[in-house]
Amino acid sequence: MAAIPVRFKRATWAAWDETAWARLSSGSEHSAESSSAVDSVSPDLSDLVDSFIESTDGDESDVGVRDGRWEMEEEEVKGEEAVVGKERLVGYLKGSGEADRIREVVEKVVGGVVGLGLAGFKRRLMTRLREEGLDAGLCKSRWERSGHVPSGDYEYVDVILDNGARYIVEAGLASEFGIARSTRQYAALLDALPPVFVGTPESLRGLARVMCAAAKASMCARGMHVPPWRRKGYAQRKWFGPHKRTTNESSAREGGGGFACAARTVGFTERVRAER
């Protein structure tokens, strides 16, 4: 099926706030991403980030990922030279053929999903992707306060291929890294982020490291405090910590259709057991 190209206005995504997403109430448990995933981040990107961040050991508890490099709190970063170049980020965003095929499907359906409003957007997106034949799921992460990281929860969509490869889907990823009074360099990085991101957890992890470091550099250049939800530890918990995954078309809180939801949940559980 041919993909229908869709263009989005970045302002539409920038206006979205994390608290606007509908809340997920059920799903199957999944552990945190393996710490080995961090080591598979593109070496040139990792070196680029490490070249202007001198880190100290931070809290590594309550995340399920024992990786000091990710959990470390950066020391103060001074000067505009700390902002990562736009061209480096664009190069890192280049996806595989699998990611491109998933992105084509997402771009085909996301316009109609957005038109129905923000409430339940990610669940509707997951449902439409499943109707297109993709094994899409709605993932919900939740975490308690730990050190400098406040408690919170987050939802995102993923797609699992027949070969076991997992891709994270984010429509409007730039809104997750928005900051006040951004420098020109940081604004260029935000503009480089695609309206629809499809990538492996490893690629998103590397992207988040770059954006969080650049956000800190931008805010320090403006003499501003960096909020905890724009630091790496918070991003770690959003996308890479333990999560529940569901394929239900409606949340457990919604009335009616309870039997259908239960049947789909059982089917998903049995599929996971079979794959194991």
Image: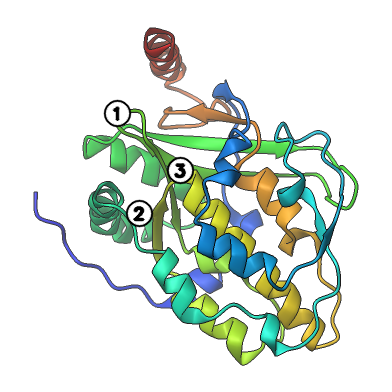
Residue 211 position (above or below residue 106): below
Decide: few, some or many residues near mark 1? Use Cα within 10 Å; few <14, some 14-19, many ≥20: few
> Which amino acid type is marked by label 3?
Val
> Which amino acid type is marked by label 2?
Val
Q: Are marks 1 and 2 in contact (CB under 8 Å)?
A: no
Left or right of 264 in this view: 27: right
Task: Tell me the tag on residue 145.
Answer: none
Most extreme residue toward the left is: 1
- Mark positioned earlier in the residue sequence (3 or 1): 3
- Of residues 197 and 244, the one nearer the viewer is 197
Q: Residue at x 35, y 54 (%)?
A: 113
Q: Mark 1 points at which residue?
A: 163
- Mark positioned earlier in the residue sequence (1 or 2): 2
Q: Which residue is drawn at 75% across and 73% down?
A: 216
- Mark positioned earlier in the residue sequence (2 or 3): 2
> Which amino acid type is marked by label 1?
Asn
Most extreme residue toward the bottom is: 184
Tell me the SS state at disc 2.
Answer: helix
Q: Which colour scheme is used?
A: rainbow
From this viewpoint, is residue 276 visible? yes
Decide: few, some or many residues near mark 2? Use Cα within 10 Å; few <14, some 14-19, many ≥20: some
Task: Tell me the tag on residue 113.
Answer: 2
Task: Tell me the tag on residue 157.
Answer: 3
Judge depth for marks 1 and 2 and give the one in front.
1
Left or right of 212 in this view: 76: right
- In the rendered image, residue 7, in percent from the top left (x then y), is placed at 29, 73
- Of residues 96 and 27, the one nearer the viewer is 96
Tell me the SS state at disc 3.
Answer: strand
From this viewpoint, is residue 17 visible? no
Q: Residue at x 77, y 45 (%)?
A: 68
Judge depth for marks 3 and 1 and give the one in front.
1
